[in-house]
Amino acid sequence: MKEKILGVLGGVGPLATIYFADLVIKMTKADTDQEHIAMVILNHSSIPDRTDYILDKSKPNPLPVMIKDAKILEEDDCDYIVIPCNTAHYFYEEIQKSVSVPIINILEETVKYCEKTVPELKKIGVLATEGTIKSRAYQNIIEKHNLECVVPSDEDQKSLMNIIYNQVKAGKEVDIFEFHRIIGELKKQGCDAVVLGCTELSIIKKDYDITRADIVDSMECLARASILACGKKLKND
């Protein structure tokens, strides 16, 4: 059987891209090097900021760059493409139209995983960038699955953006107590699960070894779906 190749349209951001590749390797059931997934990783860190463009704070459009990168991965014979960035999925449909290679949707995979693993799921809280929240990317998919979506208050969203941009992306210490406080506010509103809908938040989960069952990491969901799509088995399935 032909080996499946996973194309990673990365750089959005660079740290999240490397973490995604690490997750795929660690989550794959493999006893030898040869049993792992073949990946082509394009870590294009100069792609314009997605949130700033969505909120009309900057003019450089990231879409043409991401379409060009997707075509590069297609030319490299990738069987699937992933974009390890939730905010970038604002452009998902346009990027998918530009290539014939299936692009695994991190938002869809995360919501489906919540449905599969969270008992009596009715309400999902979402932590994400302001761009993802304002574009209603998660809200639309969650509502399509007949579930309720809850997002942080304006004040908590500002605090979360500070954590994402001025702490994680800047490589500085994270205010982990504030991070947990924001999660707690969503739980107070009756959320059965809280989605880490920004890949920088996935880094926090890893660095602080957060293992709560009600916190669903979108990056792990994408890695899991990628492994299965490429015909491999999960290590802890």
Image (cartoon, rainbow, N blue to C red):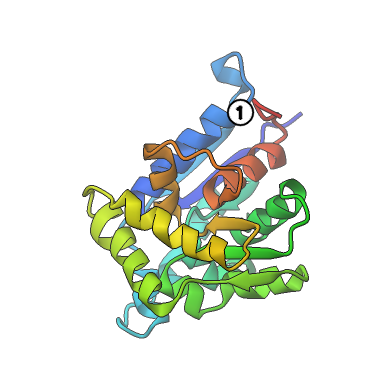
214 sits left or right of 20 in the view: right
Q: Quadrant of the N terminus?
A: top right
Badge 1: few (under 14), some or many (20 or more) residues near its Cα, within 10 Å?
many
Q: Is residue 27 left or right of 145 when viewed as pictured?
A: left
**Left or right of 113 on screen, residue 39:** left
Q: Nearer the viewer, residue 225 or 113?
A: 113
The residue at the far top in this view is 31
Is residue 10 in view? no
Residue 183 rendering spot, x and y as whole percentages: 47, 58
Q: Residue 11: give x, y in percent of width and height.
A: 37, 53
Question: What count of labels does the image hold?
Answer: 1
Q: Is residue 132 above or below residue 42?
A: below
Q: Is residue 232 above or below residue 96?
A: above
Q: Is residue 90 left or right of residue 29?
A: left
Q: Position of residue 110 (x, y in %)?
A: 64, 55
Question: Who is closer to the viewer here, 15 or 5?
Answer: 15
Relative depth, front residue between 235 and 94: 235
How far from the left and from the top, in percent, is residue 41?
A: 45, 43
Camera-nearest residue between 224 and 196 = 196
Q: Which residue reaches farthest front?
A: 188
Q: Residue at x 31, y 59 (%)?
A: 163
- Residue at 60 percent across and 49 percent down: it is 214
Residue at image point 75% right, 72% down? 144
| Residue ID for mark 1 | 28
Q: Is residue 78 above or below residue 55?
A: above
* Type of amino acid at the residue the image marks with label 1: Thr
Could one spot residue 4 in this view of the protein?
Answer: yes
